């Protein structure tokens, strides 16, 4: 019998940006043990998607080509693999496409990368009409959450939640502890807009940076103080009320340690989501010198229980999802270019 085909967007080699993407027809993937096949309703892009295309993780985890990118998806279960009991056809779920979710663990200065992709087959990511998802990284989507919203918070929301937890905020009990001063940089972005809201839910005083066009939005998400990052005051990250930060959720591209240092309290931490070479040196030096002020490289790990927690917040209206734009799958190149450009406000959605 002829294989069922689906539209998808893939790339055949590293590099090339949006021009490296190809609109193709490929067989619909088949779910294996512990997997479900989703008919996708929405996918969102994260910077890691195009960074992988540029060669991120290439030495540790070379890609098999052709490769269908994108990890954050929402859709309907249409088929289940062997051993799947908690999902059935017709269920709406959110989660990460199985093809490129990474589990990464930081231990001292070592990064251990464990690739969960079954290397023997191309299961496919979110830029497609169908994708296979591992059930341990998927959750049911409450009816109150749209597919676009559901696909928006897996990586970005979990990253914000994980970084704030590392910063010492508590989300799991009635007593949030003493109030912390948190700075969120690039607060208008995919991660930043969730970090501002979650920090407020964690009882923090929040200072945020963004461009002038997003100041009102970031305030409306709960930030107590907002700095325009293009002004001299914004560039030095100084809190207008003179507060020193207990932690910085560093979502912007490289900012030197010398800019953070005078704004941190005596035990302040910079949780760096995109640590480059300079940040890794700072991390090592601060560790070796037993400095109380620390730079902490952060790498997200996906836990279904935290996805459930975020879904509940979205359902209750306590976590807003800001969507920059929606693109059809046949216009995925424009969405890709927009993400590379780095000026989205909230999330970039692709719909099949
Ligand atoms: N470690 C991890 O596990 C992990 C997970 C997720 C993401 N990340 C990384 O975290 C970073 C943020 O991700 P994202 O999805 O939030 O990115 P994003 O959505 O592409 O961020 C875009 C936003 O950042 C703002 N921005 C850019 N530079 C800024 C600056 N210097 N100061 C203030 N705002 C600035 C832009 O505002 P304007 O348009 O006004 O410039 C835009 O609104 C990326 O580098 C990503 O790779 C890491």
Image: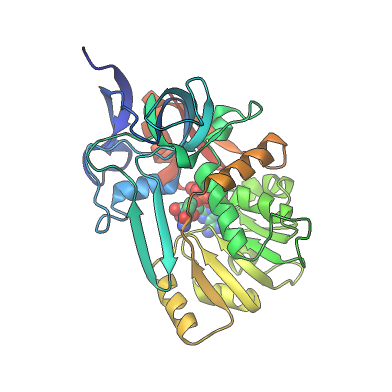
State the residue at coordinates (47%, 53%).
301
State the residue at coordinates (76%, 65%).
177
Relative height, residue 341 to residue 184 (above, below): above
Q: Position of residue 141 (x, y in %)?
A: 58, 31
**Which image quadrant for residue 139?**
top right
Q: Is residue 189 visible?
A: no
Q: Position of residue 79 (x, y in %)?
A: 40, 23
Q: Residue furthest top?
A: 1
Q: Colour mode?
A: rainbow
- Viewed as shown, does residue 342 lie left or right of 202? left
**Front residue of this view, candidates 334 and 52:** 52
Q: Position of residue 111 (x, y in %)?
A: 37, 65
State the residue at coordinates (35%, 30%).
31
**Which image quadrant for residue 169?**
bottom right
State the residue at coordinates (56%, 34%).
150
Image quadrant holding the C terminus, namely top left
Q: Position of residue 15 (x, y in %)?
A: 26, 46
Image quadrant holding the N terminus, namely top left
Relative height, residue 315 to residue 277 (above, below): above
Q: How many marks?
A: 0
**Front residue of this view, candidates 140 and 200:** 140
Q: Is residue 244 visible?
A: yes
């Amino acid at each position: 019998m002829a294989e069922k085909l689906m539209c998808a967007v893939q790339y055949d080699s590293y590099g090339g940006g949006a021009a490296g993407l190809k609109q193709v027809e490929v067989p619909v993937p088949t779910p294996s043990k512990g997997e479900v096949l989703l008919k996708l309703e929405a996918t969102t892009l994260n910077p890691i998607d195009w960074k992988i295309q540029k060669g991120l993780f290439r030495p540790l985890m070379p890609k098999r080509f052709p490769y269908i990118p994108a990890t954050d998806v929402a859709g309907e279960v249409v088929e289940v693999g062997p051993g799947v009991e908690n999902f059935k056809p017709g269920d709406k779920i959110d989660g990460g496409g199985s093809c490129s979710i990474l589990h990464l663990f930081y231990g001292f200065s070592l990064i251990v990368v464990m690739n969960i992709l079954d290397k023997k087959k191309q299961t496919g990511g979110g830029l497609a009409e169908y994708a296979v998802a591992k059930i341990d990284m998927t959750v049911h989507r409450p009816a109150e959450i749209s597919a676009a919203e559901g696909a928006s918070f897996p990586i970005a929301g979990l990253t914000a939640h994980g970084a704030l937890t590392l910063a010492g905020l508590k989300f799991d009990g009635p007593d949030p502890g003493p109030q912390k001063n948190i700075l969120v940089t690039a607060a208008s972005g995919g991660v930043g807009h969730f970090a501002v809201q979650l920090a407020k839910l964690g009882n923090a005083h929040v200072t945020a940076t963004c461009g002038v066009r997003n100041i009102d939005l970031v305030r409306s998400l709960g930030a107590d103080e907002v700095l325009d990052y293009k002004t001299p005051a914004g560039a030095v990250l100084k809190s207008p009320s003179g507060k020193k930060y207990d932690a910085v959720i560093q979502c912007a591209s490289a900012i030197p340690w010398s800019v953070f240092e005078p704004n941190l309290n005596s035990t302040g931490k910079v949780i760096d989501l995109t640590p480059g070479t300079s940040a890794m040196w700072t991390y090592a030096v601060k560790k070796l010198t037993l400095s109380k002020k620390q730079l902490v490289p952060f790498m997200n790990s996906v836990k279904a229980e935290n996805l459930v927690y975020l879904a509940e917040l979205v359902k209750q209206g306590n976590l807003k999802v800001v969507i920059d734009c929606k693109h059809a799958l046949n216009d995925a190149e424009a969405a890709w270019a927009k993400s590379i450009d780095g000026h989205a406000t909230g999330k970039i959605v692709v719909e099949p």
